[in-house]
Image (cartoon, rainbow, N blue to C red):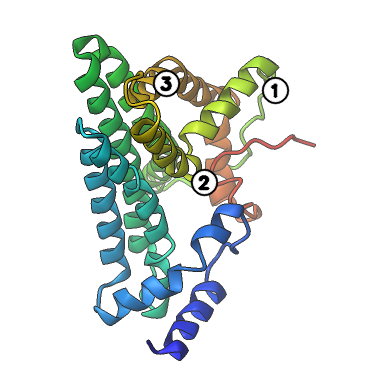
């Protein structure tokens, strides 16, 4: 292996990345990414190609998770983790090839939606295979929750861009005044604990580790006990779904989307990334 080339890939992927590698998850996955990127570059596979491969791997993992074989379920549980690893690679390949762009970012975000919905769907079908039709309502709510969670921010930005397109088509300028900030009562601490625990379980950065751990435990220790896929899907339906819906309601009730529209197109406003991108509320004043 050409060490100099790998070093160059590493330097470029770090130097030209918008966000630095700072989180504990970054420290796990980023060290290996230049070596994997080197392989894809040698194979002449583009950054977008890597993104599509990552999504395909997540889908294959989901299919294996839906089977009745504990061994295949365990193997499939690593599909989400492999997807996550390649998410560090596609950008490195694109930056090395000097082919970054909005289109590549779009493909990258799309793969996150595909992978999350695929994995939750795999868990849902696996739960159905164990308990049959009584699991249908839970499976449907779990998959809807996954779709809402994956797309609620992107749908908000779609609405924001569409509003500006309509105004521009009519010859109108951006809103002249900042939307009124609506004060709202913070949720009860019990809800916040539930929301944070739900995020802990179903957020991408955590579920990639939780799935192999649960699959291994079931494979080796609790093979005759209740299937972990059933537990996750029931929890997703009863908790993940209502929490996701409530977060969407909270966002609109405090004028969060309107404010994001104004801040994006107001020439005097400087975005705070990633807070503004993910509509994380900050106190006024």
Q: Nearer the viewer, residue 243 or 43?
A: 43
Secondary structure of the residue carrying numbered label 3: helix
Label 3 vs 1, first from the N-terminus:
1
Which of discs 3 and 1 lies nearer the camera? The answer is 3
Q: Residue at x 41, y 75 (%)?
A: 35
On the image, the x and y values in percent for residue 220 come to: 37, 35
Horizontal and vertical percent position of residue 275: 61, 46
For residue 252, side relative to residue 71 (left or right) = right
Looking at marks 1 and 2 on the same chain, the residue that comes earlier in the sequence is marked by 2
- The percent position of residue 278, horizontal first and vertical second, equals 54, 42
When the figure is inspected, residue 96 is found, relative to residue 149, above or below; the finding is below
Disc 3 marks which residue? 241
Crowd tier of the residue under label 2, counting other residues whose Cα lies within 10 Å: few below 14, some 14–19, many 20 or above? some
Q: In terms of secondary structure, where does tag 2 sit?
A: loop
Q: Is 167 or 117 nearer to us in this picture? A: 117
Residue displayed at 61% across by 38% down: 280
Up/down of 12 relative to 247, above or below: below
Can you name the residue that lies furthest to the top here? 134
Q: CA distance from mark 3 to mark 1?
A: 25 Å
Instruction: Tell me: 270 left or right of 18.
Output: right
Q: Along the line of sight, which residue is nearer the eye, 51 or 254?
A: 51
**Is residue 221 rendered to the left or right of residue 123?**
right
Q: Which residue is mark 1?
A: 183
Q: Which residue is mark 2?
A: 174
Q: How many marks?
A: 3
**In the picture, residue 139 is in which quadrant?**
top left
Quarter holding residue 72: top left
Percent position (x, y) of residue 284? 75, 35
Disc 1 secondary structure class? loop
Quadrant position of the C terminus in the picture? top right
């Amino acid at each position: 292996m050409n060490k100099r080339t790998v070093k160059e890939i590493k330097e470029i992927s770090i130097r030209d990345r918008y966000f630095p590698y700072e989180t504990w998850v970054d420290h796990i996955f980023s060290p290996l990414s230049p070596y994997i990127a080197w392989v894809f570059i040698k194979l002449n596979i583009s950054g977008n190609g890597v993104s599509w491969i990552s999504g395909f791997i997540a889908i294959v993992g989901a299919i294996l998770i839906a089977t009745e074989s504990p061994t295949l379920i365990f193997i499939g549980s690593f599909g989400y983790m492999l997807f996550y690893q390649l998410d560090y690679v596609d950008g490195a390949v694109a930056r090395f090839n000097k082919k970054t762009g909005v289109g590549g970012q779009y493909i990258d975000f799309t793969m996150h939606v595909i992978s999350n919905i695929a994995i939750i769907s795999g868990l849902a079908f696996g739960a159905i295979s164990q308990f049959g039709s009584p699991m249908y309502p839970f499976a449907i709510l779990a998959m809807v929750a996954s779709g809402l969670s994956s797309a609620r921010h992107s749908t908000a930005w779609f609405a924001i861009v569409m509003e500006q397109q309509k105004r521009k088509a009519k010859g109108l300028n951006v809103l002249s005044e900042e939307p009124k900030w609506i004060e709202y009562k913070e949720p009860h601490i019990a809800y916040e604990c539930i929301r944070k625990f739900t995020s802990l379980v179903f957020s991408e950065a955590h579920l990639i580790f939780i799935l192999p751990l649960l699959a291994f435990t079931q494979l080796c220790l609790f093979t005759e006990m209740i299937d972990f896929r059933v537990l996750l899907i029931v929890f997703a339906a009863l908790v993940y779904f209502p929490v996701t819906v409530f977060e969407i309601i909270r966002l609109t009730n405090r004028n969060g989307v309107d404010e994001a529209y104004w801040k994006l197109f107001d020439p005097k406003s400087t975005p705070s990334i990633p807070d503004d991108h993910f509509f994380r509320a900050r106190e006024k004043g």
